[in-house]
């Protein structure tokens, strides 16, 4: 069966670190060769330096919510479920078979995600018990999605 699902990666702000940005673009290009994949970078909450974290989270949530349509939503959270790479591949494959046209991976900014976004998640996923910068988290997530797509398609993962 052809893989017709889109993997959408959604987060606030552009990845500023040039090395991480290059890795992000590399994994996105690799994912596109295996199926539909794209990144949407919404606006960061700007001009709120002295605002409360809640206000910043809410402002970022407003931009992210505009793209949460028709899809299985996976929010990254430090309190989420941890999975192996094979378990993530099975989840993506299962969603492709049960009619999800899109899996939306939602990654927060430096403060994480607003609770109302976490409440909308079909799955809350933790990549590790360790803490990573939000920009590094993006790269790790893209690599794991690429690994999952290779497993689903039965390809050997390039090491």
Image (spheres, rainbow, N blue to C red):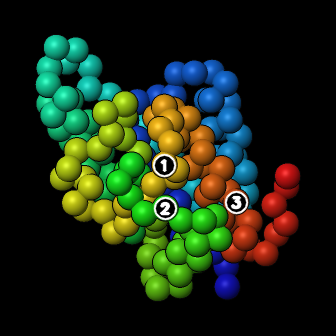
Regarding residue 88, the answer to whether it shows in the image is: yes
Question: Circle 1 is placed at which residue position?
Answer: 129
Quadrant of the rendered image containing residue 17: top right
Would you say the residues marked 1 and 2 are in contact, meaning their CB atoms lie under 8 Å apart?
yes
Splitting the image into 4 quarters, where does residue 126 fall?
Answer: bottom left
Q: CA distance from mark 3 to mark 2?
A: 16 Å
Numbered disc in front, either 1 or 3: 1
Q: In the figure, is residue 64 to the left or right of 130? A: left
Using residue 147 as the reference point, say whether residue 17 is left or right of it. Answer: left
* Residue count near mark 3 (Cα–Cα under 10 Å), binned few <14, some 14–19, many ≥20: many
Residue 37: x and y, percent?
57, 55
Q: Nearer the viewer, mark 3 or mark 2?
A: 2
Mark 1 or mark 2: which comes first in sequence? Answer: 2
In the figure, 55 relative to 126: above or below?
above
Which class describes the residues within 10 Å of circle 1: few (<14), some (14-19), or many (20+)?
few
* 91 lies above or below 73: below
Q: Which residue is mark 2?
A: 82
Element type at mark 3? helix
Q: Residues within 10 Å of mark 2 (few under 14, many from 20)?
A: some
Give x and y (percent) for residue 142: 60, 49
Q: In percent of the image, x 72 and y 70: which residue is there?
A: 151
Q: Nearer the viewer, residue 58 or 79?
A: 79
Viewer-closest of 21 and 109: 109
Give the SS element for disc 1: loop
Q: In terms of sequence position, does the residue under pointer 3 or pointer 2 come before the other?
A: 2
| Sequence-first tag of 1 and 3 | 1
Residue sitting at 53 percent across and 60 percent down? 7
Q: CA distance from mark 1 to mark 3?
A: 20 Å
Expressed as whole percent of the image width and height from the top left, the position of residue 133 reads 48, 31
The residue that disc 3 covers is 147
Residue 46, compared with residue 73, is above or below; it is above
């Amino acid at each position: 069966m052809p893989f017709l699902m889109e993997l959408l990666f959604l987060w606030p702000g552009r990845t500023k670190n040039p090395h991480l940005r290059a890795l992000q673009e590399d994994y996105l290009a690799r994912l596109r060769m295996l199926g539909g994949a794209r990144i949407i970078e919404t606006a960061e909450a700007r001009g709120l330096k002295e605002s409360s974290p809640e206000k910043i989270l809410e402002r970022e949530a407003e931009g992210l919510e505009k793209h949460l349509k028709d899809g299985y939503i996976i929010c990254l959270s430090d309190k989420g479920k941890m999975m192996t790479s094979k378990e993530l591949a099975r989840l993506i494959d299962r969603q492709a078979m049960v009619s999800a046209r899109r899996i939306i991976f939602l990654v927060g900014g430096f403060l994480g995600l607003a609770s109302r976004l976490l409440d909308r998640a079909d799955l809350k996923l933790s990549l590790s018990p360790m803490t990573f910068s939000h920009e590094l988290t993006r790269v790790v997530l893209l690599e794991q999605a690429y690994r999952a797509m290779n497993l689903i398609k039965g390809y050997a993962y390039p090491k």
